[in-house]
Image (tube, rainbow, N blue to C red):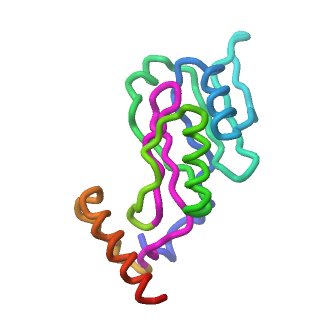
Amino acid sequence: MIAADAPVLDGVHHVKLPVSDLERTRSWYASRLGYVPLIEFTKGGRMTGITMRHPNGGPMIGFVLDPDLAGRASGFDYFSIGVRNKADLEDLAGRLAQLGEDNAGVHFATIGWILPGTHDPDGHEVRFYTNDHHTQPPVGDLPLVVDDPIGTETERERAHRSQASQES
């Protein structure tokens, strides 16, 4: 399929995660990231899911009560939440640390900066990635190929810093 034949899409509408305790999840996402409830789903008078929205532009996140699936899905990073720039990402890392949440700190990543290592109450890794880039994504049909992304980031960061200092 070529771009002219591609359907029109408009970003990610929402993501959905299985959880073992809806109230604990609601509280964590509200207190750590500022999410607020948008929709509650019930069946037979019992809450089975919630969708939360973010007041400052984050993606909607849905949570469905499924303790078995939540346990099996624990540890995986299903998505990265966009943050404007590196300074905002560093502020978020500080906020999470103040709230007692582990994180791996802000790191140079493929095209922007990443804050990995935060886990919600069910162990899903919640990652944050800047929408501001230090390296422009490729234009056209050829993808950027990154061999050994973890191993090469230090080298790429050094080259980026060197190029930035030469341009100054």
Q: Residue at x 47, y 61 (%)?
A: 113
The picture quadrant where one finds residue 24 is top right
**Left or right of 44 on screen, residue 122:** left
Q: Nearer the viewer, residue 44 or 156?
A: 156
Pick whichever, 20 or 130, lies toward us: 130
Residue at point 49% right, 25% down? 122
Query: In percent of the image, x 69 and y 12: which residue is there?
Result: 46
When asked about the image quadrant of residue 148, the answer is bottom left
| Location of the N terminus (image quadrant) | bottom left
- Give residue 71's position: percent from left, percent from top: 41, 22
Classify 76 as above or below 68: below
3 in relation to 102, above or below:
below
For residue 85, above or below residue 166? above
Q: Which residues are magenta?
A: 112-138
Counting from the top left corner in percent of width and height, residue 32 is at 63, 36
| Left or right: residue 143 compared with residue 20 | left
Number of labelled discs? 0
Q: Is 35 part of what is drawn in magenta?
A: no
Query: Is 143 left or right of 96, judged from the image as shown?
Result: left
Q: Quadrant of residue 89?
A: bottom right
* Residue 116 sits inside the magenta stretch: yes
In the figure, is residue 35 to the left or right of 79?
A: right
Point out residue 28 in the picture as x, y percentages from the top left corner. 62, 29
Residue 139 higher or lower than 68, as above or below: below
Give me the residue at 54% from left, 60% from top.
130
Choose between 129 and 106: the one closer to the eye: 106
